[in-house]
Image (spheres, rainbow, N blue to C red):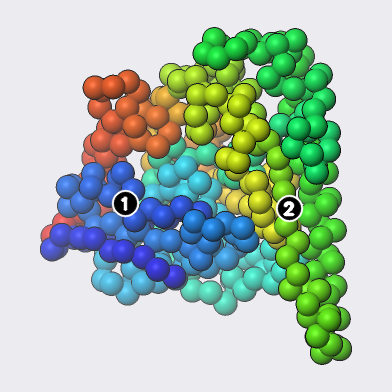
Amino acid sequence: MSGVLRMMPGARTVVCLMHPRQDFTHHVLVPELLSRGVAVWTQGSRSVNNDLNLLHEQAVLDMAAGQVFLRSGGFEHVVTLGHSGGGPLAALYHQQAGLLPGQRLFRTPAGRPVDLASAEMPLPDGAVFMAPHLGQGALLKRLIDPSVTDETDPLSRDPELDPYNPENGFADAPADSSYPAEFVERYRAAQQARIARIDDHARELAADATAARKRFKHSGVADDRRQALAPRIVTVYRTDADLRSVDRSLDPNERPYGSLFGSRPDLINYGLLGFGRLSTPEAWLSTWSATSTHADFLRCAPGINVTTLLIELTGDQAAFPGDALAMMEGFGSADKTHERVPGLHFGGPLAPGEPTGSSLAGDVIGTWLAERFPVTA
């Protein structure tokens, strides 16, 4: 566990920013919160900037270590702040921390033991979410290209499922595409089917590694150990194919044309960038599989019972209005607030010269915190 604590003298409330994959040390909300007298803890997981073997169950343990550290620091109140992929991680932490130890997760989706039962998991006093998406798995379920016909060939393509085929409703950038409802339904079913196929492959690979570990435990033979250690990597091609990136009539908001990766997803989809492109079988099942992951926001939301603030950015390209409404309905808290502010997913402005989404969110968060927690002495 590593982290950075920033605070002004007399700070009584600390906000914890954490993401399972990214370094939040210089997150855009850090100066916004500090200027309002709030202490800020930015923490990484063991998989920051290298998510090849990212297991969310381990990231929850990392988050727990940070929460223990903050409680020992004498703060009166600890509030989590989940932005983007930090949202489903925080949701999973709240859900697990709110359970009796014996009810917590004890295995990853691939079957590897994880000991949350014996971990000290302090329950935070509040939860803030800014532009949280539904989880890496749920995100990828809408991003993955179902027209891939051969998982070993990045150029394989079923034209009837190709999102960037004009015959299916695609229009050349920057014109908005218009996909028929029948195609959208068929496309999304095919996305789920592709994920299921990758799930099956990942489980087979994970089972091979598990069997080798068991053999070595009993045999002590070096070759069994080599087979257990040998990397089994799941490669997933073409993961920038969310229909909503180019057809903004689907779950509409004020987002610009394009995806989180750029304004030409029809080209980026074939390149190196993309979510879930390389992972171990265990990481695929724990993080990127919409079917298997425990870090699913909507499944975790009923376990969030503390006072909760959800900030929706009106130009978000990854968390959409329908997602925000489902989150609000799912929260277990009786004190839950939903605010919308203009901005892009990473906190930028909707247009040059306009206020940034992060500054507007900072105002909302500052007011919300001051109304519920003593910020400074």
Q: Kindly indicate the quadrant of the structure image that contains residue 238.
A: top right
Residue 59, horizontal then vertical, whole percent: 53, 62
Residue shown at the point (52%, 39%) measured from the top left: 133
Disc 2 secondary structure class: strand
User: Mark 1 highlights which residue?
Assistant: 26
Residue 239 lies, with reference to residue 93, above or below; the image says: above
Residue shown at the point (66%, 51%) measured from the top left: 278
In primary-sequence order, the first of circles 2 and 1 is 1
User: Mark 2 highlights which residue?
Assistant: 234
Which quadrant: the C terminus?
bottom left
Residue 171, horizontal then vertical, whole percent: 62, 10
Q: Is residue 302 visible?
A: no
Residue 171 lies, with reference to residue 73, above or below; the image says: above
Residue 47 lies, with reference to residue 368, above or below; the image says: below
Question: Disc number at residue 252?
Answer: none
Type of amino acid under label 1? His
Callout 2: 10 Å neighbours few (<14), some, many (20+)?
Answer: many
Residue 101, horizontal then vertical, whole percent: 59, 71
